[in-house]
Image (cartoon, helix red, strand yellow):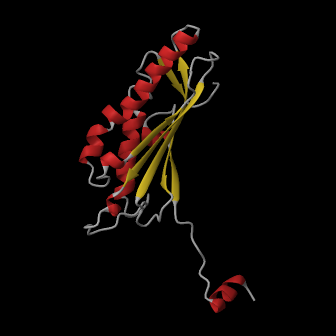
């Protein structure tokens, strides 16, 4: 007896993975020096949260050594990372009908405490978790997270990803830091 027949006889349903993760191509984001994944761990047909994970390697153009230099340059890097959320994403998130809970979003940056510790590139990840309109109690529609068919939510996430990728820091316009896709070229 095959598995499908056995499952049907005992009332089991084949379970599908509820979430979805999509790696955005550099042709979509417009930035070849960062990797961006978007997705949800919730039910992809009506997710309550969507994540964007951006990763890259950072180099420092300014030369220096010592603890004071390391603290200063790391502090400047931290300010640049957080300005992506506070400045670059502020308007799009305030106006978004798909992500109406701006005060509840979670923005986390992970990088070494001292990015100048070994004169090599340091890995950085930026994760943004957005609460969707599917969390609204008075909603009239559920928004699925799909990149084909009903793509409203996915399209809005792509807009946000493009803003992140085109930020001054990640697009390479900041003269103190260089952004790379790999540790070594």
**Residue at 43 percent of width and 53 percent of height:** 50
Instruction: Please say if 67 is above or below 53.
Output: above
Comparing 118 with 165, the one in front is 118
Q: Is residue 112 visible?
A: yes
For residue 178, side relative to residue 157 (left or right): right
Pick the front one: 70 or 156:
70
Which quadrant holds residue 173? Answer: top left
Q: Position of residue 154 (x, y in %)?
A: 39, 54
**Image vertical order of residue 21 relative to residue 119, above or below:** below
Residue 185: image quadrant is top right
> Who is closer to the viewer here, 118 or 148?
118
Task: Identify the image quadrant of residue 56.
Answer: top right
Q: Is residue 171 visible?
A: no
In x, y percent, where is residue 164? 40, 36
Q: Position of residue 51 (x, y in %)?
A: 46, 50
Q: Please tell me which residue lies in front, 66 or 141.
A: 66
Which quarter of the rendered picture does the N terminus lie within? bottom right
Seen in the picture, residue 4 relative to 90 is either above or below; the reply is below
Residue 97 image position (x, y, % from top left): 26, 54
Left or right side of 83 for 7: right
Q: Name which residue lies at 56% across and 21% down.
A: 115
């Amino acid at each position: 007896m095959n598995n499908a027949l056995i499952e049907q006889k005992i009332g089991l349903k084949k379970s599908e993975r509820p979430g979805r993760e999509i790696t955005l191509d550099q042709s979509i984001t417009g930035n070849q020096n960062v990797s961006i994944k978007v997705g949800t761990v919730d039910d992809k047909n009506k997710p309550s949260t969507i994540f964007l994970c951006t990763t890259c390697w950072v180099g420092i153009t300014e030369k220096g050594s010592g603890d004071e230099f390391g603290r200063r340059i790391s502090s400047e890097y931290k300010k640049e990372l957080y300005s992506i959320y506070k400045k670059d994403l502020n308007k799009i998130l305030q106006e978004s009908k798909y992500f109406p809970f701006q005060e509840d979003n979670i923005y986390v940056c992970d990088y070494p405490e001292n990015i100048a510790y070994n004169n090599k590139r340091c890995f950085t990840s930026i994760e943004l978790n957005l609460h969707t309109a599917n969390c609204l109690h008075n909603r009239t529609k559920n928004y699925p997270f799909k990149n084909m068919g009903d793509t409203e939510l996915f399209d809005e996430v792509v807009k946000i990803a493009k803003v992140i990728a085109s930020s001054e820091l990640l697009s390479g316009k900041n003269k103190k830091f260089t952004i790379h896709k790999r540790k070594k070229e």
